[in-house]
Amino acid sequence: MNAEVNGASGGTLWRGWLRLTPGLALAVAVCACAMWASAILGESLLGYQRSPISPVMVAMLLGLLIRNVFRLPAWIQPGLDFSVKRILRVGIILMGIRLSVLDVFQLGTMGIPVIVGCIAGALAAVTFLAWRMRVPKSLGTLIAVGTSICGVSAIMATAPAIEAEEETVAYAIAVVTVFGVLATLVYPYLGEFLFGGNGNAVGVFLGTSVHDTSQVAGAAMVYAQTYAAPQVADIAVVTKLVRNVFLVLVIPCSVALHARTAGARWAGRRTAWRQLLPLFVIGFVALSMLRTVGDAGQSRAGMAFGVLEGETWEHIVAGVSRWAGYLLVVALAGVGLKTEFRNLSRLGLRPFAVGLSAAALVGAISYAMIVILNKVAGWGLGVVP
């Protein structure tokens, strides 16, 4: 009898995986094409050492194109749903390995106030603008976290927690990516103009005002190569990594604020905690703490956790981070493959106006705080207002 039950369960499980295979295979294929296209466009054509064109954005655009040009059969849908809901959450958990609290100490006291000011200003301003312009609350929340923290990664980490629809996620990613790419192209030269060639100030400015980590690296490399200032790349990337660490705090705060403004009701303490800190967010924080402890051991004794040599630990971190990237690209390919243009058009152009205002505001806050703190705290950056 038990053998029959086990056989039936095994058969059901096998059939379940077979139902997922077509959609998953399509999402993985789009992921592979997107990563290839991102490298070709950003590195071979534009000449960057690291492409500022996110494969996540390319995957979503390819998925949108396929969805809206071809009529996808119904048996594709289960695999796409699995990509968007399950694979996305696993990717977010693994993404936690990229964040180490020790990055805060590497940056020192110079950039922390600027980072905090930019994050707080962006969150407050975007929330207010989204309310005034009647942008849907979930879309406003995603644009706010994407602008203030780390672009696409922040949006993908927040979207499941507020149960945002695929069309909303796709639109928010498009908004922050467009303005992130524009900042990558413009801000290196703007930084030179604003700060008179002071590399330290430019590095902090790029790290706090450009959205995505790859875009920060690209903008910093443009500046470093154009103005012969190699230290700018290191300062900008470390500033951005510290900015990313604040994602651990911003996700729960954004979820709570979204629930409050959306009029959500939590039935009991247990339900509230599950909504505020979903399991994938807890996993994300756990991986971040694991990275921090491992890095601390490596820095202090040359061995992560007392057993892993530095090179081995770095390989593990790089491998997990790489797989997080793969899974997130697959998930966003699924988002594109499930989204129809007619649903995006219903959101209108107002969110783009919010995104443009937010991008400009973050840059302005970064510049103002660098100038003010240089005068008040005597950083010695030589910043000329």
Image (cartoon, rainbow, N blue to C red):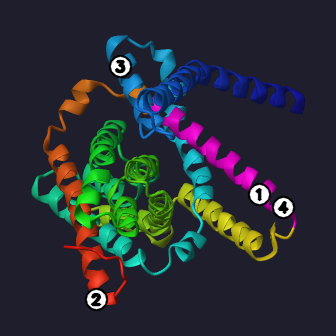
Q: Range of the magenta residues?
A: 307-333
Q: Residues within 10 Å of mark 4 (few under 14, many from 20)?
A: some
Q: Secondary structure at mark 4?
A: strand
How far apart in space, not on screen, are marks 4 and 2 (Cα)? 43 Å
Who comes first in sequence, dot 1 or dot 3? 3
Who comes first in sequence, dot 4 or dot 2? 4
- Residue type for callout 3: Leu
Name the residue beneath numbered marker 3: 65
Discs 4, 1 touching: Cβ within 8 Å = yes
Name the residue beneath numbered marker 4: 309
Name the residue beneath numbered marker 1: 313
- Residue type for callout 1: Trp
Which of the image's four quarters has the N terminus?
A: top right
Of marks 1 and 3, the one in the foreground = 1
Please say whether residue 289 is one of the residues in the magenta stretch.
Answer: no
Which one is in front, 356 or 168? 356
Q: Which mark is residue 376?
A: 2
Q: Residue at x 81, y 30 (%)?
A: 5
Who comes first in sequence, dot 2 or dot 3? 3
